[in-house]
Image (cartoon, coloured by chain):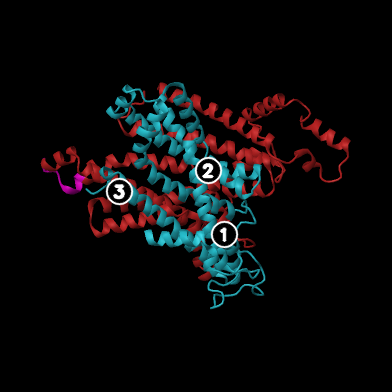
Chain colours: A cyan, B red
Amino acid sequence: MGLLLAILFFIGLFPSLVTKRVAMKSGYTAGLAAPSPGFPLGTDQLGRDVFAWVVNGTRVAFYVGTACTLISFVIALMGMFAGYYGGRVDQMLMRVTDLTMAVPRFVLIVVFTTLLGSNFINIILIIGALSWPTLARIMRAETLALREREFVLSARVVGSRSIDILFFEIFPNILPSVIPSLALQFSYSVIDEIAISFLGLGDPNVASWGLLISIGRQAIFAGGWWVLLSPCVLCIFLLVCLNLLADRLNDRFNPKLRFNL
Amino acid sequence: MSYFVKRLIQIPFVVVVVVTLGFILLKVAPGDPVSMFAGDGATQEYLEAIKKAYGLDKPVIEQYFIYMRGILKGNWGHSLSFDRAVLTVIMERIPYTLLLAFAGFLIAVPMGILLGVIAAIKRSSPIDSFVSGFSTFFNSVPAFIFGLILLYAFAVYWKILPLGGIQTVGVSFPSYAAKLIDLLRHLVLPAISLALIWMVGYARVMRNTMVESLLSDYVRAAVSRGISHGRVIFRHAFRNSILSVVTLAGVHVGYMIGGVILTETVFSWFGIGNLVIQAVSFRDYPLLMGILFFSSIWVAVVNLLVDAIYVTIDPRVRLG
């Protein structure tokens, strides 16, 4: 599983090593063409190479996942501050997360993308900025549990600054609970981007799997199952690997939670 | 009871905040609605007239209060693409989305519970690992991807089920029953693709809580009193685990509108999710905002109901 994920990651980093063709360039064939030695995954209605698209789509998925997870992680650090300081800051944060949970996230993503324009950077920012509440809640809960522990109190007694306590005492200790959630966050972000592109709301110039899936939904009526199934299979593959990774990380970092009953 | 009052008060609060957010978004969104409405080559006088007619010449704060008052009174604006009131358009779609969700539940809840119970009784056996692998698989992937694969297999390749929509176009049905069967045939694929994803959630929750209660002291006490195995499983462990199923069902129903957008799009189902796509492709902002408000009210109401059910079925829970 880890090896497969590493291979995908490698393809995502260096798509040009795997395919010489340009993704989304039309006219390689006259129309829809079935998989053949020349085109291992065939071409779509406009003669675009599916293999090149899918390979570049891997890169897009990794961009989206990494960027969105990073953005939501940074925003979610607020949860740590809120848990540590408590009081009004904490109250505010909890109300904000309540509110973001009051609206279905995907509806919000659709509304924001429609109104603010669907270029790639916008979409990444929107997904990242709407995904942090769960992470923030985890960080807050973990910080609350650690706040009165001896090692934190002793750091405070010797006069450490709060910011140092937060980043050198508390932060390393909440990571075990946070890291598995990051892997999940990564997969949710990838799903959101694929979904947005599938709906035709994505950036038309980015070789996303979602866009290819929406083309494939048309192609199946002309017999072009390879256009639909290639991105779907790769996407299922990546998402299942990410979830297994999250499970594995959880077992590793939080062994006491393991259900080995 | 004070808890419910608090929850009830929260609903208008959520509405006010979401409406405010919607108003701000509409204001900061690029593009000028007036010139979009008037079309190219409109004269300056015409633009001014439109502005006046829609109250866009008033200060922003006043516009905001007019907007808010309208929403609270149930005037959710006029859908540009349907040329009808937004609320009417939404209400027309709701039954179909509910039908789809209900069909999904009808498959997902019993199947999920069954899988979970079997996995819990046979824990650490091959059956248990199969259920957990199955759950991880379907838990990882969004419903619409499976929907597409099902669509290809059953509607395009084998041609045994319809491609989408809610009824066969251009066919007159001899009886009401024939019409109903036609609707059900259209319902099968979208319902199954939703159900697959939901089902594994119930299986997981059911398995974990069942295992927990099967190992708890009260179950061991029941066993030692000589109560039969089946009775212990169903009267003691099972009943306790149903609570977590209710919680999960609340989440699924509450966030239904976000969840069905893609599945409805794949199968062109005539529900609210499909409406979102229509609103987006026609840039029908009033309709889009209406759906946003509706979905947040829906979440709040469902949460309230779930709390009520919780108190009713679990005497230990007294929300104070």
Which mark, residue A252? 3
Which mark, residue B164? 1
Discs 1 and 3 share one subunit? no
* The quadrant where residue A39 appears: bottom right
| Residue in the picture at 70% in, 24% down | B61
Boundaries of the magenta span = B225-232
Q: Is A140 on the left-hand or right-hand side of B315?
A: right
Residue at mark 1 to residue at mark 3: CA–CA distance: 45 Å
For disc 2, the marked residue is A128
- SS for callout 1: loop
Q: Nearer the viewer, residue A127 or B280?
A: A127
Nearer mark to the viewer, of 1 and 2: 2
What x and y, as percent, mark residue B157? 52, 70
What x and y, as percent, mark residue B222? 15, 40
Q: Is residue B186 above or below residue A110?
A: below
For the image, the number of numbered tags is 3
Tell me whether the residue at label 1 lies in contact with that at label 2, contact meaning CB atoms closer than 8 angstroms: no
